[in-house]
Amino acid sequence: MKLIVIGSSSAGNGYALDAGGEILLLEAGCRMSEVKRAIGFRLHDVVGCCVTHEHGDHARYAVEYARFGVKMFGNEHVREKKVFPFGTYTVLQPGKTVSIGGFRVMAFENCHDVPIFGYLVRHESMGTLLFSTDSYKLPAVITGVDHFLIEANYSDELLKRNVWNGTVDRAQADRIMLSHMSLEYCIRYLRDCQASKAKTIILCHLSSRHSDVNQFSKAVASAFGLPCYVAQKGLTVELYKEVI
C-alpha cells in the first residue's frame, strides 16, 4: 500500500491510499486535475473518497469528484452544504463499518468548529490506518493501529511566541487552539494509543506559521522510535502490514 500526499495544508488537503488495483481517496480539497496526476491518471481504480468535514480546504471539490464518477462518503453536514448528483454521496454513521472496494472504513466523531469525522481504514495489504485532521482533541483512544495519519498543526511554544510578537492576534490563536491539534496533544494521544507498537506515523496539516517540520518529525520519532514523516505535496510513503 502506498500513501500519496496530494496536498496537506490550508491551500488544499488530499491523500490517496493506493493498493495497486484500487485507490481510496481521503479528502477532496485538491482539484481533480491534481488528483489524476498524483495517481497516474488511474481514475478508473478509485473506489471512493471519504471527506472529514465541509471546510473548503477539505471538501471544496467534493461535487467535482462526484461528477467524475467518484463515490463520496462523509457526514450529513457535508451533504447538506453541497449539491451532489443523485446517488453519489453516502452518509456514514459513526462506529459502523462500511466496505469501499477492498477497504473497510469506520467513521468516528472528532472535535472541530463544524461537525467532523475521523476515519479508521483497514485493508489487507496495510492493516489499519487512523486518519484524523482538524480536530483539537480525539474523544476515543484507539489501540492496535498500524499507521497514523494525524494532524499536528502547531506547537504551543511557537503559537504563544507568535501571539507575543504580534504575528497572530489572541482571537485567532484561540480559534486555532479550539479547532486544530497541537504537537504536544498529538504526542500525548499517540502515547495513549500505544503508538510505539505501530509501524508508521505521518503528521499532516502543519501550519505554515506555527510549526517546524524538522522539530515536529524529530519529536515524534524520538518519542516512539518509529519512522515519522511530514505530509507534504508529492510525498509517497509505503504502508507495510508487517515490519520489514
Image (spheres, rainbow, N blue to C red):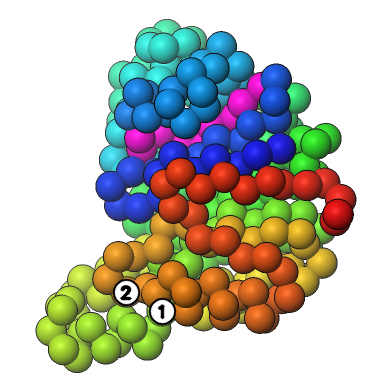
**Residue 80 visible in the shown view:** no
Per the model, the C-alpha gap separating discs 2 and 1 is 6 Å
Residue located 65% across and 57% down the image: 148
Q: Residue at x 65, y 51 (%)?
A: 130
User: Toward the viewer: 144 or 209?
Assistant: 209
In the image, is 238 to the left or to the right of 24? right
Seen in the picture, residue 14 relative to 142 is either above or below; the reply is above
- The percent coordinates of residue 224 (x first, y second) are 71, 76
Residue found at x 71% / y 37%: 1
Question: Residue 29 in magenta?
Answer: yes
Q: What residue lies at 33% left-to-right and 43% top-to-bottom?
A: 12
| Residue 196 placement (x, y as % from top left) | 77, 71
Mark 2 and mark 1 lie on one chain; the one further toward the N terminus is: 1
Q: Which mark is residue 63?
A: none
- Residue hosting label 1: 155
Does the image show residue 42? yes
Give x and y (percent) for residue 153: 41, 66
> Could you tell me the amino acid type at mark 2?
His
Residue in the foreground of this view, choosing between 89 and 228: 228
- Tag 2: Cα neighbours inside 10 Å, few (<14), some, or many (≥20)? some
Q: Amino acid at mark 1?
A: Ser
Residue 50 higher or lower than 229, as above or below: above
- Residue receiving disc 2: 210
Asked whether the residues under the numbered discs 2 and 1 touch, taking CB atoms below 8 Å apart as contact, a structural biologist would say yes
Taking 231 as reference, is 97 left or right? right
Q: Which residues are magenta?
A: 22-30
Name which quarter of the figure residue 149 lies in: bottom right
